[in-house]
Amino acid sequence: MKKRFAWIMVAVMVFSIFAVGCGARGDSGSDEGSADGQTYTIRMAYDVAESHASHIAAEEVFVPMIEEGSNGAITVELYPNSQLGAVPECIETMRTGGVEMAWGSDADIAGFVEEWNLVGLPYLWTSLDAAHEALDGDFGQQLSALAEEKIGVKILAIPDVGFRNITNSKKPIESVADLKGMKIRTMTNTLHLEYFEALGAIPTPMNFSEVFTALQQGTVDGQENPTAMIYNNKLYEAQKYMTISEHVYTAAPIMISMKFWDSLPEEYQTLIQEAAEKTRDRQREIITQQNTDYAKDIADAGVAVNELSDEAKQEFQKIAEDTVYKTAAAAYGQDLIDMAAAHNK
């Protein structure tokens, strides 16, 4: 009898230990280190290729920081090359919670929140440092608040893809006159459209995923993008000329659905915010180096690369001041423009 009782006690103890262990994982089977006993999947969508700085930074920093920091309770899935659709489509889906995160451009958000068009104001910032300071500070906070209020998307951090340059299949661009009549693909930014019209070109907005085919088929003569985008997405293969114009800076905000964000425990919100900021810092390091290195690689591939002279750049700037700056001030307020430009040294 005593022997049987002893065996019963052992069985009870083993069962209790097993039950406690499973209970710690929660009904969802999440790791015992999870904040709320739930598991989560973050799908992050973007247009750029796997060789781009944004994808590299996401793989190097964001994914491991989130998955390790959550003890495996959060899984991050990366979808480059517009696999889940163009970024504007993903922003629409984020609003309903269909996609958790997207990484796009300021123009992608400007389609929903017009004030974001100001980021693409020609020659707004004189250096990367000035742009970073503005977007990490008061100007970026103002734009981020508008995105959250108007479309239910939280801006976690604002990396960039650098300053934009022009490529085309017709001739070198050495002055404003060389752009006359040239069909140039632009982002869907109303200020860009007005600016390129003022330069004498025919601006043709389209989603980034359509650009390479449009260049190949001659639907457009050229396009404008940061050097790394031109190289990583092989746009230069369908072009003969590239002009270092640095006419517009392009931000690359990391966005998360507010619907998804609000469903997370505070511990995970803090983790995701920190991971996004560290990813921003790493992405900026990589993209700055890529933009420098790839200009030479594009030239080595047989594209004729030239840089605008100071005199030509002044001509480009003067047209911007006489046109889109006035439009932007009337539409969005001179105070926002001044807030951004105040970071120039």
Image: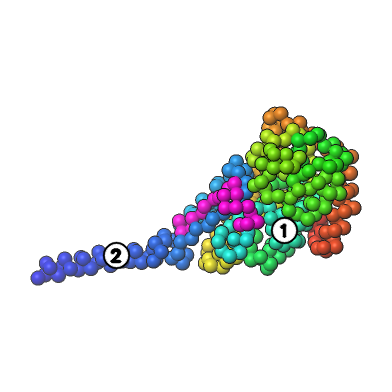
The image position of residue 249, as x and y in percent, is 75, 49
Asked if residue 113 is positioned above or below residue 323 in the image, the reply reads below
The image position of residue 321, as x and y in percent, is 88, 52
Residue at x 76%, y 31% (from the top left corner): 304
Q: Identify the magenta region.
A: 72-90
Q: Secondary structure at mark 1?
A: helix
Q: Amino acid at mark 2?
A: Ile
Identify residue for label 2: 17
Identify residue for label 1: 110
Residue at x 88%, y 49% (from the top left corner): 319
Which residue is nearer to you in this view: 24 or 208? 208
| Mark 2 or mark 1: whose residue is earlier in sequence | 2
Task: Tell me: 240 left or right of 255.
Answer: right
Q: Secondary structure at mark 2?
A: helix
Residue at x 68%, y 50% (from the top left corner): 207
The image quadrant of residue 92 is bottom right
The image quadrant of residue 232 is top right
Q: Are marks 2 and 1 in contact (CB under 8 Å)?
A: no
Res. 246 in view: no
